[in-house]
Image: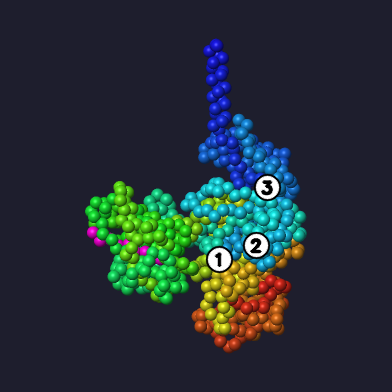
Amino acid sequence: MSFSILRGAALAALLATSAIASAAPRLDSVFSDNAVIQREQSIHVTGEADPGEALTVTIGGQERRVTADASGRWIAAFQPMEAGGPHRLTVTAKGGAAQVASNILVGDVWLCSGQSNMEWPVRRSLNGEAEAQQAKDDEVRLLTIPHKTALERRQAFEERPAWQPLSPESAAEFSAACYFMARDLRKSVKVPFGLIDASWGGTRIRPWMDEAAARASGSGRDVGLLALYRSDPSAAARNFAEHWGEWWRGRTGQTAGTEPWNASSRLDWKPFPQIGPWEQWGIAELAEFNGLVWARRRFTLTPEQASQPATLMLGVVDDLDQTWVNGIGVGSSYGWDNPREYSLAPGVLRAGENEVIVNIGDSWSFGGFHGPAERLKLSFAGSGEVPLGEGWEYSIVSADPGSPPRAPWDSHAGLGTIYNAMVAPLGPVGLKGIAWYQGESDVGVAGYDDRLTALIASWRQQFRDPDLPFLVVGLAGFGMPGAEPTGSGWAQLQDEQRRAAMRNSATVLVPALDLGERADIHPPNKQEVGRRLALAARTIAYGDAGGRIAPMPVAASLTADGVRVEFTGSLRSLSGARPIGLELCGETQESCRYADALIDGKSVVIASDGRPASRVRHAWNDFAIVNLYSGDLPAPTFELEID
């Protein structure tokens, strides 16, 4: 055999091997089988391939040639397409390896996001089983984003979600508010719909914000702390513990050096009956306790042990902890399912007696160490361990100081941790609009309007639309109605939702204050929430004359007869000749009092009672009973300064 033949055979073998080794290019999940692509907008298809790979991407008769960057990411931009389909979307590498996404439709794509009331599934809504059985529409597709967190922004989903055509089975577990909105819109908008549900129960807004939004809303300190945590977790833990200490001293009046982690002997300690939730200890005052409890464990180390790098293991702590060792903050985390493991920097441990102090915060259900006791220990890098499953003491924080600060790396309560894993991987996908139903977990945390405004801006930037319609569902009433005017964190949050909606273009508040349940934070009537979302969407996303939005207060001014509050729509009172739930207030909460009022077209005129008033409030209650409406949509909770 000649040398040229041998060389040709070797080259052919090498090329064959390279083709086998080269991975097929991959489309991102949002462009997989059964996907819906936003109509009448530029289309940006994204995916992964080998770095430097030359690719050909085709859809609907359009073809683009792109090259994967050094990280293996690629993006192909296409001209807008009209509603219709089905289409095939194909990405092909130069060597012939390809991925094909089939049954692609072009229509309207809505992103639905928030906490549990957005996540609440169709099957658990009012008449849910029957509603799910009627959910049959091949032109509606559903995509549920799995719960994941990440400390840094991800470009692809860790666990790839899959689009599903609407069916009784797929609808049953899908977001009820999102589905019912789309179902109502489909009655007048005759195009395919793609619904993306990225929601997570019990979450604050902070983990849904990227770092730019956090800075814009005043959380620059946490952004810097998160950056430190990525490079030096121990230093970040100490830094955050100082912040936690500032909060504690501000709430309790204690001075530096007298706090429990520095002077634990000041507390009244009692022995743990067992490792496990304190509700199961058989102690009456802890049987249904939600709040803060101190836990202490003392132990002795040899000089050799104290000199080694070590990890403190506490097992699962339900649900929030801030932990110190010998007065040094070593870790803080949140969650009822993630074990706590904190690395101890050199110098934290010492020969002789050592002390672990844990502040445990429980917001509902079980609280404390989950156990078993064997999971609590000090593990040394060299070898060996010190069991810590016995000998714990506790002390209840009797005077509630409020909600402690949360570490910015704190799983699904941290800064951007959910955004990074559940929203960022959507990339610049085209959307018709966003429906946002969140806020319950932010009650009592001031500045929600600034945080929501920053989130809206950052999400619009990601999805490349500065006027992307944003629908904000207001909190539903929850709790007992008050007989007298009262302060209400629930009402304050609703008012901050309203302020954010009125501050931002193409943003609408969809009130739900009249849809609540006194004893259930998850009211089941998601059909009405969906209907109101659809009405708002028709107004700001479709320019449909059939759309309507709730009446919003514009201004309050002093007149000869009292105070006139102007609204954006005509008003009426239901079940009575006069609107109720209106208050006049001075500077203090004690000055607030209910006031008589009359409707005058698009205004409410509140009668003067001869007492000073600088503010007017409406529905300022955890569970407000209201009758001020425009058509069948209620006026929201609000507070206005009187001009």
Horizontal and vertical percent for residue 15? 56, 25
Q: Amino acid at mark 3?
A: Asn
* 10 Å crowding of disc 1: few (<14), some (14-19), many (20+): many
* Secondary structure mainly formed by the magenta segment: strand
For image coordinates 76% across by 59% down, the residue present is 188
Q: Residue at x 61, y 63 (%)?
A: 120
Q: Which residue is mark 2?
A: 123
Mark 3 or mark 2: which comes first in sequence? 3
Residue 150 visible in the snapshot: yes
Q: CA distance from mark 1 to mark 2?
A: 23 Å
What segment is highlighted magenta in the picture? 352-360
> What is the quadrant of residue 168 in the picture?
bottom right
**For discs 3 and 2, the disc positioned in front in the rendered view:** 2
Q: Secondary structure at mark 1?
A: loop
According to the image, label 1 marks what residue?
439
Q: Residue placed farthest to the bottom in the image?
A: 610
State the SS at label 2.
Answer: helix
Q: Split into 4 quadrants, where in the image is the N terminus?
A: top right
Left or right: where does residue 362 sit relative to residue 183?
A: left
The answer to whether residue 224 shows anywhere in this view is no
* Residue under pointer 3: 34
Q: Is residue 498 magenta?
A: no
Q: Is residue 386 above or below residue 531?
A: above
Q: Please report the residue visible at 61 percent of the width from the left and 84 percent of the height from the top.
A: 595
Q: Earlier in the sequence, mark 1 or mark 2?
A: 2
Q: CA distance from mark 3 to mark 2?
A: 23 Å
In three-dimensional space, the C-alpha distance between marks 1 and 3, rounded to whole angstroms, equals 32 Å
Residue positioned most to the top:
2
